[in-house]
Amino acid sequence: MHDKNLFDYSVIRVVPRVEREEFINVGVILFCKAEKFLQAKYQIKHERLLAFSPDLDLECVNENLKAMGHICYGNKEGGAIAELDLASRFRWLTSTRSTILQMSKVHPGYTANAAETLEKLYAELVLQP
């Protein structure tokens, strides 16, 4: 049996009207120090988001989600934050904020394969109706 490694994850949420605290899960970000793994997986379901909030700027949401991806991978397009170590990038991405894109609280777990766990969490928390 493989050893399991500690991981942390957070659910990426779109919160169109912050004052109402209503949201739709659009993705998951997962960090596993032992596997040197930091990735986000998301999907923008345009019809669903517009039904939830007809005035939502989907282009803005998409650009911000892309920026998260750049930060996860440490791409230069992610700016100065993308130059930080993996743990610092994860903490920065999952910090509490009052914006249209928000993260759930960080949840821990154990995994034998961070990439598979990300896919499982994404299917359970984002794709399920």
Image (cartoon, rainbow, N blue to C red):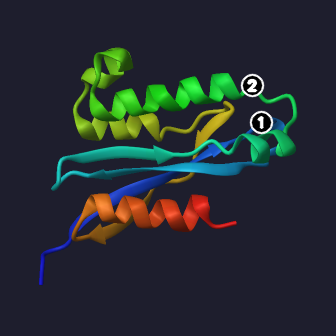
Is residue 47 left or right of 120 when viewed as pictured?
right
Q: Residues within 10 Å of mark 2 (few under 14, many from 20)?
A: few
Q: Residues within 10 Å of mark 1 (few under 14, many from 20)?
A: many
Q: Are marks 1 and 2 in contact (CB under 8 Å)?
A: no
Task: Give the farthest residue toward the front.
Answer: 47
- In the image, residue 69 lies at what x, y percent? 40, 33
Mark 1 to mark 2 CA distance (whole Å): 9 Å
Which amino acid type is shown beneath numbered disc 1?
Pro
Image point (81%, 39%), residue name: 50
Q: Secondary structure at mark 1?
A: loop
- In the image, residue 114 lies at what x, y percent? 28, 60
Disc on res. 32: none
Q: Quadrant of the N terminus?
A: bottom left
- In the image, residue 116 lies at what x, y percent? 32, 64
Residue marked by disc 2: 57
Image point (69%, 32%), residue name: 100
Residue marked by disc 1: 16
Which amino acid type is shown beneath numbered disc 2?
Asp
Q: Nearer the viewer, mark 1 or mark 2?
A: 2
